[in-house]
Structure formats: C-alpha cells, structure tokens
Image (cartoon, rainbow, N blue to C red):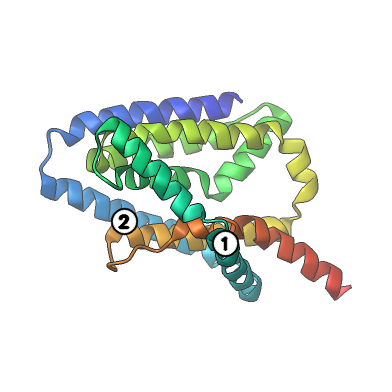
C-alpha cells in the first residue's frame, strides 16, 4: 500500500499548491490550463485506445456498458451526489462533477494504475506507482489551478480504488490475461477521450462518461467469452 499512500500524498500536495496558484492567475489562464489538461487527456486516451486488437469487442463493451449504466442510473446517481455535495459546501451546481470525478478518472483509468497496484501488492515494490505519483502530483496542481481546491478530494477516491486493487492483486492477476488487460486499457482510453472532450467543451452536451463505466468490466469479460467461443 506504500505506493498508493505516496500517490495520495502527491495529489493532495499538488492540489493544495495548485489552489494557491489559482488565486494568483487570471481567469483566462485558468481556462487555458483547463484546455491543456483536456488536450493531454485526449492524448492519453488516444494512446490507450489504439492499442486494441479487436475494435468490435471494445465497441460491444462500450455499447452494453452504456445500456447497463443508463439502466442503473449511474450518471444520475453521481449527479445527485454532486448536487448534495455542492449544496453542503456552498459550491455552484456541477462543481463536484468537474473537480472530483474528472480528476479521479484521469488518475485511475490507465495502465500504470493497474500494473503499479499489482506490482505493489505482489512484490511490495512500487516504482511504477512512484512514477505515477509524480505525474499525478503535477496533474493535480494543474487541475486545482484551473478548477479549485476540491480536486484534492479525488485523493480519497484514489486511495479506495488503488488500495482495493493492491490488496486484491493476487486475485486480479489470476483473473486477467494479457489480452483482457489490453482491451480493458483500450476501453479505458475511450472513456478518457470522452473526458477530454468534456474538458475542452467541444459540445454543448457533455459525454456521459460515468454511464459508460460498466464497459470497463465488460471489456475483459468479452475477451474471455470470445476466446471460449473460438475454441
């Protein structure tokens, strides 16, 4: 867990520094920082997505994931939670979604997260998560400079998600084959592309990324099923 704890600390410190920096910069610069984060998020998502070897499986995972996500109202549940949090903290409507959910997904949806947590859980070593911690610290600084101090709250979600992955490392290693891992990352890349689009405000209606989260479970499952039918 030491790698995850280091990651949490760097996010909190980065967010704190970014929030202080944000007070000293203009609104125009804050907007430009947000655009920069959006562009880099698109880059990360694109690099992950193009690694797929079976676009049909990724498409199927995204489509069925959307059906599941909309059926169980993941997006609305998060929106309701966001509205409640905004009301309690005096923020404007939608602040929680932008400042907590988006950074959390950027920090957690990626190959370094899974591989780093597996390495930490199986060997006790965490060079991958240490590298990720540095990157996330700077990312949190940029997020907070553009979006405010609440970005630091994403550290709690990172602790829960990466902590669970680290503690469950042995079980996860047995479940995921390299093919399943690759398509999982590719599907995660598609979700990051959606986040990048939202950050850049390229359309009036945001991509409903939270409703697509079930696709991250479905992608490796479809790989497993396809291999069984192939035999």
| Residue 199 tag number | 2
- Judged from the image, the secondary structure of the residue bearing numbered disc 1 is helix
In the rendering, at what x and y percent does residue 120 appear?
65, 31
**Camera-side residue of 70 and 102:** 70
Compared to residue 99, the image places residue 182 above or below, namely below
Q: Nearer the viewer, mark 2 or mark 1?
A: 1
**Crowd rating for badge 2 (residues with CA inside 10 Å; few <14, some 14–19, many 20+):** many
Which of the 4 quarters of the picture holds residue 204?
A: bottom left
Q: Position of residue 223 (x, y in %)?
A: 73, 65
- Callout 1 crowding tier (Cα within 10 Å): few <14, some 14–19, many ≥20: few
Q: Is residue 123 found left or right of 154 in the rendered image? A: right
Q: Quadrant of the C terminus?
A: bottom right
Between the residue at mark 2 and the residue at mark 1, the CA separation in whole angstroms equals: 25 Å
Which quadrant: the N terminus? top right
Residue appearing at x 37%, y 59% in the figure: 196
Q: Is residue 167 left or right of residue 111?
A: right
Residue 65, above or below 40: below
Query: Which numbered disc, 2 or 1, marks the residue that appears first in the sequence?
Result: 1
Q: Is residue 192 left or right of residue 84?
A: right
* Along the line of sight, the residue nearer the viewer: 132 or 207: 207
Q: How many labels, in total?
A: 2
Asked where in the image residue 81 lies, by quadrant, the reply is top left
Q: In terms of depth relative to the viewer, which is nearer, 52 or 92?
A: 92
For disc 1, the marked residue is 71
């Amino acid at each position: 867990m030491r790698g995850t704890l280091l990651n949490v600390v760097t996010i909190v410190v980065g967010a704190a520094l970014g929030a202080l920096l944000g007070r000293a910069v203009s609104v125009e610069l804050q907007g430009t920082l947000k655009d920069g984060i959006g562009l880099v998020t698109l880059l990360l998502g694109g690099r992950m997505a193009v690694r797929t070897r079976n676009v049909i499986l990724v498409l199927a995972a995204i489509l069925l994931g959307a059906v599941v996500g909309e059926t169980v109202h993941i997006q609305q549940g998060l929106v309701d939670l966001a509205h409640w949090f905004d009301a309690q903290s005096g923020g404007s409507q939608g602040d929680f979604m932008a400042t907590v959910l988006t950074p959390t997904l950027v920090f957690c949806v990626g190959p370094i997260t899974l591989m780093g947590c597996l390495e930490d859980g199986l060997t006790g070593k965490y060079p991958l998560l240490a590298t990720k911690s540095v990157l996330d610290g700077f990312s949190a600084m940029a997020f907070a400079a553009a979006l405010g101090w609440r970005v630091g709250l994403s550290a709690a979600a990172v602790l829960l998600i990466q902590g669970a992955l680290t503690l469950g490392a042995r079980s996860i290693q047995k479940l995921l084959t390299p093919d399943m891992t690759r398509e999982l990352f590719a599907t995660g890349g598609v979700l990051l592309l959606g986040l990048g689009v939202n950050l850049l405000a390229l359309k009036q209606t945001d991509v409903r990324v939270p409703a697509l989260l079930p696709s991250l479970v479905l992608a490796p499952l479809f790989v497993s099923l396809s291999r069984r039918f192939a035999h």
